[in-house]
Image (cartoon, rainbow, N blue to C red):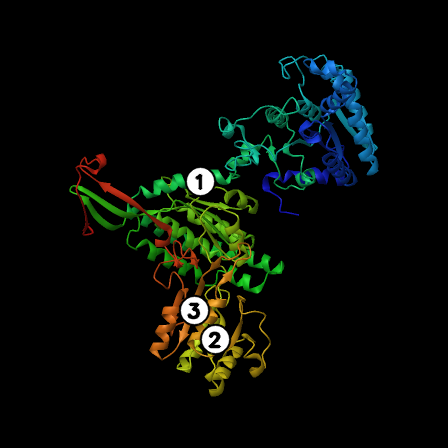
Amino acid sequence: MDSVDSTRAFMKDVRRIVVKEHKLDWALAEVGTAVVTRSDGRLAPGRLGALCEQIQELNSKGFEVILVSSGAVGCGRQRLRYRKLINSSFADLQKPQIELDGKACAAVGQNGLMALYDTLFSQLDVTSAQLLVTDNDFRDSEFRKQLNETVKSLLALKVVPIFNENDAVSTRKAPYEDSSGIFWDNDSLAALLALELKADLLVLLSDVEGLYSGPPQDEKSRLIHTYIKERLEGVITFGDKSRVGRGGMTAKVKAAVYAAHAGIPVIITSGFAGDNIIKVLEGQRIGTLFHRDAHKWVQLGEVSGRDMAVASRESSRRLQAMSSQERSKILLDVADALESNEKLIVTENEADIAAAQQAGVEKSLISRLALKPGKIASLAKAIRVLANMEEPIGHVMKRTELADGLVLEKTSSPLGVLLIIFESRPEALVQIASLAIRSGNGLLLKGGKEAKLSNAILHKVITSAIPESVGERLIGLITSREKIPDLLKLDDVIDLVIPRGSNKLVSQIKASTKIPVLGHADGICHVYVDKSANMDMAKNIVLDAKTDYPAACNAMETLLIHKDLLQTGGLNELIMELQVKGVTVYGGPRVRKEMNLPEARSFHHEYNSLACTVETVDDVYSAIDHIHKFGRHVNCLKPFFLSNAHTDCIVAEDSEVAELFLNQVDSAAVLHNASTRFCDGFRFGLGAEVGISTSRIHARGPVGVEGLLTTRWIARGSGQVVDGDKEIVYTHRDLALQA
């Protein structure tokens, strides 16, 4: 089962009360005409069958379900049209056809509708009962009392009561809603029954997933998961009423608001899906929820992803309006806050580690999760480095005189709002947040569930250091995984997504969004030891690249060795050094037999642990070919898409071989006689990194402040106009950059 959304947690209570305490509590479902009938008016037995199966399953679990069904008029109309056709002469058919009486249609259709329900339920060993009511019935207090008694008796026997308005004898007149009516369609009847019979939940089934911000068929429309009247008035509009019934979405929303205000939670969801009612009662984020306390959830932080993104953008604009000194001071305050709260941060981190160990999380992930001694001090130091860097916003990169008195400047500018999705490492939250502040960007963060407590305290400490003039909503923390799909649709308010985690995570995000994605896939980092290498240097580099931090994306995963070192004993020495340090060494096809090593499963395998693959190559050209073949990742979700290699190193004393390697290996970072672990934002002098990009657009390698900026053109003139370029004389002269 998917994780339960926090706003639907009360569903668990409804289920437990029913199962354990055996109270007279139930869910009540209303089935709209559009659900039970097809576009031609005929009944839809497939959808009804799926509905009956769900009700049978709920019955068997102890739920008591009352059904309110539409469809009688549509079903009867189809039958009576057929009767009229076969009983009409050819001359009669040439005359203008009068619409059939709706009450007659209801009288005929109700019989067929209930016969189908009875047949379907009988196949599932469930008994159903028909209860027809009219608006006037509910004016009688004795009727309502007897209604409760009847329903109570039926539910005690696990019989499913099926309600419908008795349209055949109803005296209510058009329009379908009037001020005198107690109910005016089956949606409002369902709401009335939910209150009258003290239901725990009302489910209104529709032909769409729920309430949308615009027409459901419009790809820009978004599903509204929680209805909050104060925030949605004037934002959403409703279309025409149902194509076959009286109400449509307008009627459903009115009924839902009415019931929710009276204390009955309501879900509007699709009746076309075969298991939506089950999912609703499991607490999954299905359809649109109407709840009396929904406005309080917003105050408690249950804000939509769109609202978080919009608020973050507004805060970022206030941040950009500050002086460089004021932005720097925010970072210095963040660094101080981290150090002063170190004990609290470490306590929460230790709780995360303990929970991960108890849950059996892999050791490599736990290693990434831990904030080791000195880490907070190191992070604070990096933030102070960022604070003292040259101002990145508004930096003039190029000045051009377009014409006399008309000067154009190319300047640096924040990207806007960033969405960063990262796994395990809570330190990433600190680095990313500090880079966002320095670059003037808004930020939404979604960390892994294994670092929940660590991320929460770090977010609280950092945002508490942001002045009120900017607002703590500059940096939003996403705590629910269910919000991610919706966030990835917000290409109008989120400007860049940066996933930091597994290849699977990166691939899924790239395939799920129109927002530009900056990230890397597998970090298959290579060290090639040439025959000209200084072997003592090679040992140090290889050991550092593999053992300094095995879980890092810039740790060595494959060691390539010139074939001549097999004869000189150099290969054996390197393997022994690795094994002494506890590294499990796997062999490629050429090495494993010679050195009696276990077979490597693949050259494209990221261990993230004390393990690596070793293989021999003929020369530097073979090493380059190997890296190009296995350092890249073929994305299964998007065939033919290749992400570029991460970080690769050559250990060699032959300068010509080294230069050949440096110039021809097409990786984000290439090093000569230095460990791959140097490929890091802090070590590269960027202050910190938001991640390492293996793509080519728009940043590559460790991404620091510069990678979070774009460009703006600013022109300063003195009244120039184009006017067909008749008068203006273009000079296009490069100008010196001003301090």
Q: Secondary structure at mark 2?
A: strand
Q: Residues within 10 Å of mark 2 (few under 14, many from 20)?
A: many
Asked whether the residues under the numbered discs 2 and 3 touch, taking CB atoms below 8 Å apart as contact, a structural biologist would say no
- Which of marks 1 and 2 precedes in the sequence? 1
Q: Where is residue 412 shown, x and y percent of the image? A: 30, 49
Choose between 549 and 626: the one closer to the eye: 626
Residue at horizontal 57%, vertical 64%? 363
Query: Which residue has dot 3 on it?
Result: 648
Asked whether the residues under the numbered discs 2 and 1 touch, taking CB atoms below 8 Å apart as contact, a structural biologist would say no
- Which of marks 1 and 3 precedes in the sequence? 1
Q: Secondary structure at mark 1?
A: loop
Cα–Cα gap, marks 2 and 1: 46 Å
Query: Which residue has dot 2 on it?
Result: 560
Drawn side of residue 369 relative to residue 90, left or right? left
Q: Where is residue 504 shown, x and y percent of the image? A: 55, 56
Cα–Cα gap, marks 3 and 1: 37 Å
Task: Count how many numbered circles sit on residues in the image.
Answer: 3
Choose between 34 and 177: the one closer to the eye: 34
At label 2, which amino acid type do we have? Leu
Choose between 2 and 728: the one closer to the eye: 728
Q: Where is residue 271 shown, x and y percent of the image? A: 67, 34
Drawn side of residue 716 relative to residue 535, left or right? left
Residue 178 visible from this viewpoint: yes
Query: Which residue has dot 1 on it?
Result: 492
